[in-house]
Image (cartoon, grey):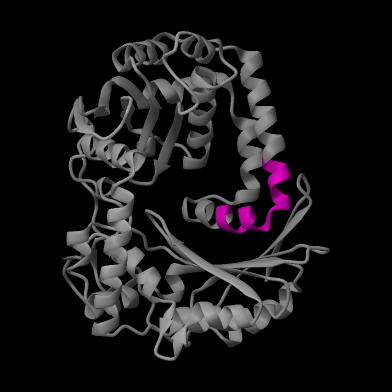
Amino acid sequence: MKKQYYAEIDETLYETELTNGLQLFIIPKAGFQKTYVTLTTKYGSLHTNFVPVNGSEFIHTPEGVAHFLEHKMFEKESGDMFNVFSEQGASVNAFTSYDRTSYLFTAVDHVEENIRLLLQMVQQPYFSAESVQKEIGIIAEEIKMYQEQPNYRLYYQTLQGMYHQHPVRQDIAGTVTSISEITADTLYECYHSFYRPENMVMFVVGNVAPDSIAEFIAEHQFAEGREQYQPMIAAIDEPAAVRDKEVSTPTDVTRPKMMLGIKSECHKLKKPLIQTEFEMMFVLELLLGEQTDFYHELLKDGLIDDSFGYSFVLEPTFSHMLIAGTTNQPDELKARIAGRLTHATFDEAAFRRLVKQTTGEYIASFNSLEYIANQFTRYYFNGAILFDIIHVLERINLETAVSTFRQAVDPDNMTDSRLMPRD
């Protein structure tokens, strides 16, 4: 088992690849009571067009299958796995994102037994026609509930205004129509194509002995000798320009809600995604952060309130900036933000303070086992090791960060998305 010590943060990472292709990472944390374990497959909501295992042609699956499959993995012929984990003193959960589905548990004791349960749950799918139909009804109600929330509606209205055909336009859970097309056969086909050890990562962090826990996992893992297969996923052809410059919907809100979505080309830059992500985050903070004079001017002029916020999303196949808030003067706020993005100047000292603050917060986050486990897998799938971020932060400077921002962001390539009061 490979062992790597990171002196800057006093952490040791153990890594091994099991004979069936599963990547296993372990971080021992002496003195911690809890152990946190994740088992993640590189399969998310974007993976709707692929060549299935034993297939030769691309197929299209309904939007929402990855999320639907996550739900169904907890249901077995013998009963609900939530109850089984609870009997062993573990808290179990799962989530689906654009590019991965992760199953996880936290436990104080019976760690090995809970690992065995987690592996068993993920290795032994059980889908019946009756249970799939029942789940369609449950998830459909979930989707309808979210669609009634103004912030949810504004978010997806913005994405659908920005993107022509990229699957990020659709909710991770799919639509009521798309999930109605899911069958047990659909789930089995997607499971056997993506839930393969060579397409998965397991991560263990807590008060564990790396050698013995790795040996236990190897004994209870997927069957040996399976044919190595990497899913072939269709490339996404998405134009650089936004689909709609403006989109507005009258709805039951008391004040206008606005979201500005700027489509970016950051995911195409010839540099590590992690570095690009930090550079964009720092520039946005210098432009729009609560510590800036610009933010306080907007506040003083009554253009924003505490609902104002911004984010930058960077994934291997798409990237964009979102700026949102509730305002009585959406036109004025949009003009001020566009001007800020185009003509702002930057202070070197403020930039260095921001990098230093982020580095401190990053180091402090290693007291959270949940943060380590979830972020480690995300960064790993994007070609980076979480503990290398210290060196990434050391390399970043204001000049390259502003250059990245200017290359990737064109304020003219913007979708102005609004929810307006009906009157």
Q: Residue at x 53, y 58 (%)?
A: 377
Dividing the picture into quarters, in which one does residue 363 lie?
top right
Q: Nearer the viewer, residue 132 or 59?
A: 132
Q: Inspect the magenta stretch and tell me whether residue 369 lies in it.
A: yes
- x, y percent for residue 198: 45, 72
- x, y percent for residue 370: 63, 57
The residue stretch that appears in magenta: 362-375
Can the viewer see residue 246 in this picture? Answer: yes
Q: How many labels were placed on the picture?
A: 0
Q: Main secondary structure of the magenta part?
A: helix
Q: Residue at x 64, y 84 (%)?
A: 113
Above or below, comparing residue 389 to residue 85 in the picture = above
Q: Inspect the magenta stretch and tell me whether residue 59 lies in it.
A: no
Q: Residue at x 18, y 40 (%)?
A: 164
Left-right relation of 177 to 65: left
**Quadrant containing the N terminus in the rendered view:** bottom right
Above or below, comparing residue 134 to residue 155 in the picture = below
Above or below, comparing residue 190 to residue 148 in the picture = below
**Quadrant containing the C terminus in the rendered view:** top left
Q: Nearer the viewer, residue 408 or 117?
A: 117
Left-right relation of 276 to 269: right
In the displayed image of the protein, which residue is found farthest to the bottom?
78
- x, y percent for residue 94: 48, 65
